[in-house]
Structure formats: structure tokens, C-alpha cells
Image: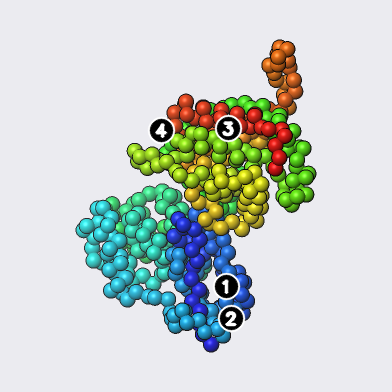
């Protein structure tokens, strides 16, 4: 028998860590090749980790809600295959008290205003019987939360484990400084400039009661519903974007009659030939990619006072999930794909997004985003920029409307298929001329669609 060390796999170029959501296999369970062992979450998507070997799960080295670095050993599997590359089975590395204390000292030394901490405060952190992940310890140190205060916080993780969300919720909901709590319960030193105040046992219940919050509760006719993890991430990202970028939105109305009639003409044969349905989304993405090549300064990001011009054209498409949240899978190098390739990519990413099967790297490194508000029957929208990008295009619903056409015999009124395009852009680096011209160019590509185009 040999023991295989299961590593947290690399999940994308910019993904360095993940949170364990749920273990699907428990110690003692028999595992087949490619069985899903656990579910993990990054800041973008949820993923599953399959087993690369068959055998028996011996030990889980991380609990639910723990943050794990890519490449770390997360489980031990007993297998009949002698894996020479696997290291001998061992307990997860535990720092000696002196090493742990040194780690805490290193963290504290890097926090402004903590030069005069007492030795007692450092020792209290080191000898705490409760397990805290490195991420939780870092946040606690940065927020000047003492060991006693940290121990008093109720955890929602496995076996009462304190998670990052528990700590962040506690920090955001603290109604009063720690020293005021201490003054009400016992005479203690001033804690305004210290990480480790001496909170007495009598103070602990007060701290616990101040942070106990149900996920959902009823108050009269109102219901309080706690955001889920993805909802919190989206909310934070949207607020950050509004604080970061100077949002401006420009609108164009486009006559897309030729495009609509062309799709009606080819969609049955296309589905029969390619076994794929062709929607308007790949057509929009093709037009956007062409317009970006015409106006490359819309395909940039901002770093301080520097503008980074992106070589690749990676277009994200906002996709609605069954939970009500949104996710933005990215089509890499969209300008290099023809309409068939774009259709297959759009359908594949949209389907796997709804089934929560996206890989973390498939939501990374977008340079421009498209959102289809028309799929909800909306005629236009003012979308929020998906940072660190500088522009996002919303396409509205296509409606039949009377429009004036210029002909060689004079102006006539005809029924046409019309839609609104709305481009939100970062006015720090994209001025009105560039933003307005770009969205007009996208409309031009859609309006001048070749009705006789072969695909």
C-alpha cells in the first residue's frame, strides 16, 4: 500500500488560493478514479476537485471554510499504486510554539502603530487552543482584534471554526470599540492603540451576543435574508467599481433588420449542420471585436496614472445563474474566432455557467464585457464597468418600430427591427468622443450586416 498526497490543483493563471466549501468524501470512504472529493470556491467560481487515483480516503488536511493555497496537500489517499512522487504520509505541518510566535511577530511588525505591543499579547495569540487559518489571523492582526476577542466570536464553520466571513461580519457590525465593552464589564487598560486588551470572562457573553446573526429572520411582515457568498462578492465588486471609475454612458439606436432576417434564414440549417443553436450573442461579440480592433484604446486598463493597452481581445459575456446571481465567462482571443467558433464558445460557456461547471480561469483576464439586457425584455441599460476593464456594452431587446428610410425616390416610413446599444465607460481614460464613436462603430457593423452572408 502507498499513500498519495492530493494537491490543490492550479485553477487559473491568477488564482492563488481557494476556500473549501464542502467535503463530499469522508475519511474511510472508498474512492474511484475521477470521483469528486470536495467542492472549492475562488473569488470567481465554484469548482469540484476530482481524485486522480483510486483508493481509500485516509485524512482530510483542511476543514470546510479553510483557505488553501494552490499546490498545498489537502488530503491523503491510500492506494495500491506505488506513487514514487508522493511523499510519505505525514501529519499536516504544525509550527512549534516558537515558530508560531515568530510568525505572529512578523505579522505584527508590519502593521503601523503596533511597535509597543506587550509580550503578553503575543503569547496569548500563540497559545490559543482554537485553530485559526492564516487568513483569519492576518485579518485579526490588521484590525487589531485581540486573542480573547477572537476566541469569543462564534464561528459558522465546521466544529465552530471561525471563517473569514464570520470575522468580516463581526468587524463590520461592531457597534462600539472593544475598550467600551471592557469598561462595562471590568476595569481594563485602554485598548485604543493595542491589539491585545485584557477582556475578562464576564465580557465574553457580551461580545458573543453582539455578533450572533441568523441567516434569515422575520420581523413583523419583513424578512431579512443574508446574502450568499457569491452575492457578497458581486456586491463588493460593483461598489468598488463605482468608487474607482468615473462612469459615463452613451446610447445609440441601431437598425438591425438585415441581421435579424439573416439569422431567421440560416438558423435551421446551422443547427442541423453544427448541432448548435445560433443566437444573437455571437453576432454581437463579433461586432464588438471588430470595433475594438478599430479603436484599441477601449481595450485598456488603468494602473494608477498608467494606461495598460491590452494585446489580446478577451470578451466577457454576463450570464444569469439559476440562483439569481451573475457570472462573466470570458471568450479568449475573440477576434481570432469566426462566427461558428464564437457560437460554439458562447453556447459552451453559457451552458457550463448555468450548471456551475466553469473553470476559474474561464472567468479571468477579460478586457471588455458584453451584457444582454434585452434577454429580460429591457430596451436599454446603464451597466457597471467590470473592473479592471474600462468599458461595458449593454444590448437591449430588438423591437419592431416605424422608422424613416431614405430611398432614391424619397423618404419612406417602414417597419424595421430596432435596438438600443448603451456603452458605459471610464471617463478617466475614455472621453466622450472615443466612447461615442466606439458604440457607433459597433452599431454600424450590425446595421451593415450582409443578408447573403454564408456561414
Q: Mark 3 to mark 4: distance in Å?
A: 22 Å
Q: Position of residue 354 (x, y in %)?
A: 65, 52
- Which residue is at 41% across, 69% downward? 131
Q: Which residue is mark 4?
A: 428
Q: Mark 1 to mark 4: distance in Å?
A: 48 Å
Q: Which residue is mark 2?
A: 55
- Which residue is at 78% across, 45% downward? 269
Disc with the residue nearer the chain's start (3 vs 4): 4
Camera-near label (3 vs 4) is 3
Q: Which residue is mark 1?
A: 51
Position of 209 with respect to 445 (left or right) is left
- Which residue is at 51% across, 27% downward? 436
Camera-near label (1 vs 3) is 3
Q: Which residue is mark 3?
A: 442
Label 2 sits on a secondary structure element that is strand
The image quadrant of residue 68 is: bottom left
Q: Residue furthest top?
A: 410
Q: Are marks 3 and 2 in contact (CB under 8 Å)?
A: no
Q: Are marks 2 and 1 in contact (CB under 8 Å)?
A: yes
Label 3 sits on a secondary structure element that is helix
Q: Which mark is residue 150?
A: none
Amino acid at each position: 500500500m502507498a499513500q498519495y498526497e492530493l494537491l490543490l490543483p492550479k485553477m487559473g493563471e491568477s488564482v492563488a488560493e481557494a476556500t473549501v466549501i464542502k467535503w463530499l468524501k469522508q475519511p474511510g470512504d472508498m474512492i474511484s478514479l475521477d470521483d469528486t472529493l470536495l467542492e472549492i470556491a475562488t473569488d470567481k467560481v465554484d469548482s469540484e476537485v476530482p481524485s486522480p487515483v483510486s483508493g481509500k480516503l485516509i485524512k482530510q488536511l483542511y476543514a470546510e471554510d479553510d483557505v488553501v493555497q494552490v499546490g498545498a496537500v489537502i488530503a491523503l489517499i491510500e492506494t495500491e499504486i506505488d506513487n514514487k512522487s508522493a511523499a510519505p504520509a505525514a501529519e499536516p505541518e504544525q509550527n512549534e510554539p516558537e515558530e508560531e510566535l515568530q510568525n505572529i511577530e512578523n505579522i505584527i511588525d508590519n502593521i503601523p502603530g503596533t511597535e509597543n505591543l506587550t509580550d503578553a499579547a503575543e503569547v496569548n495569540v500563540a497559545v490559543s487552543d482554537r485553530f485559526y487559518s492564516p487568513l483569519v489571523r492576518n485579518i485579526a492582526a490588521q484590525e487589531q482584534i485581540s486573542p480573547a476577542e477572537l476566541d469569543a466570536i462564534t464561528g459558522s464553520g465546521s466544529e465552530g471554526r471561525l471563517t473569514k466571513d464570520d470575522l468580516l461580519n463581526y468587524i463590520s457590525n461592531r457597534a462600539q470599540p472593544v475598550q467600551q465593552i471592557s469598561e462595562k464589564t471590568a476595569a481594563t487598560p485602554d485598548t485604543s492603540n493595542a491589539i491585545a486588551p485584557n477582556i475578562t470572562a464576564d465580557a465574553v457573553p457580551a461580545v458573543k451576543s453582539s455578533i450572533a446573526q441568523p441567516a434569515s429572520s422575520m420581523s413583523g411582515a419583513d424578512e431579512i435574508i443574508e446574502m450568499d457568498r457569491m452575492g457578497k462578492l458581486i456586491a463588493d465588486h460593483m461598489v468598488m467599481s463605482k468608487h474607482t471609475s468615473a462612469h459615463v454612458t452613451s446610447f445609440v439606436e441601431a437598425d438591425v433588420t438585415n441581421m435579424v432576417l439573416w439569422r431567421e434564414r440560416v438558423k435551421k440549417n446551422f443547427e442541423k449542420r453544427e448541432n448548435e443553436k445560433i443566437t444573437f450573442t455571437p453576432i454581437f461579440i463579433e461586432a464588438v471585436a471588430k470595433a475594438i480592433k478599430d479603436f484599441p484604446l477601449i481595450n485598456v486598463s488603468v494602473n494608477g496614472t498608467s494606461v495598460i493597452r491590452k494585446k489580446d481581445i478577451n470578451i466577457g459575456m454576463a450570464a444569469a445563474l439559476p440562483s439569481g446571481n451573475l457570472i462573466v465567462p470570458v471568450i479568449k482571443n475573440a477576434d481570432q474566432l469566426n462566427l461558428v467558433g464564437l457560437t460554439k464558445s458562447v453556447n459552451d460557456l453559457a451552458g457550463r455557467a448555468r450548471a456551475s461547471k466553469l473553470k476559474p480561469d474561464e472567468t479571468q483576464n477579460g478586457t471588455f464585457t458584453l451584457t444582454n439586457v434585452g434577454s429580460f425584455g429591457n430596451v436599454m441599460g446603464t451597466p457597471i464597468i467590470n473592473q479592471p476593464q474600462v468599458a461595458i456594452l449593454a444590448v437591449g431587446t430588438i423591437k419592431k418600430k416605424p422608422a424613416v428610410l431614405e430611398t432614391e425616390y424619397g423618404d419612406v416610413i417602414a417597419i424595421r427591427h430596432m435596438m438600443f446599444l448603451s456603452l458605459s465607460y471610464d471617463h478617466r481614460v475614455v472621453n466622450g468622443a472615443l466612447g461615442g464613436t466606439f458604440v457607433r462603430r459597433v452599431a454600424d457593423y450590425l446595421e451593415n450586416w450582409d443578408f447573403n452572408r454564408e456561414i
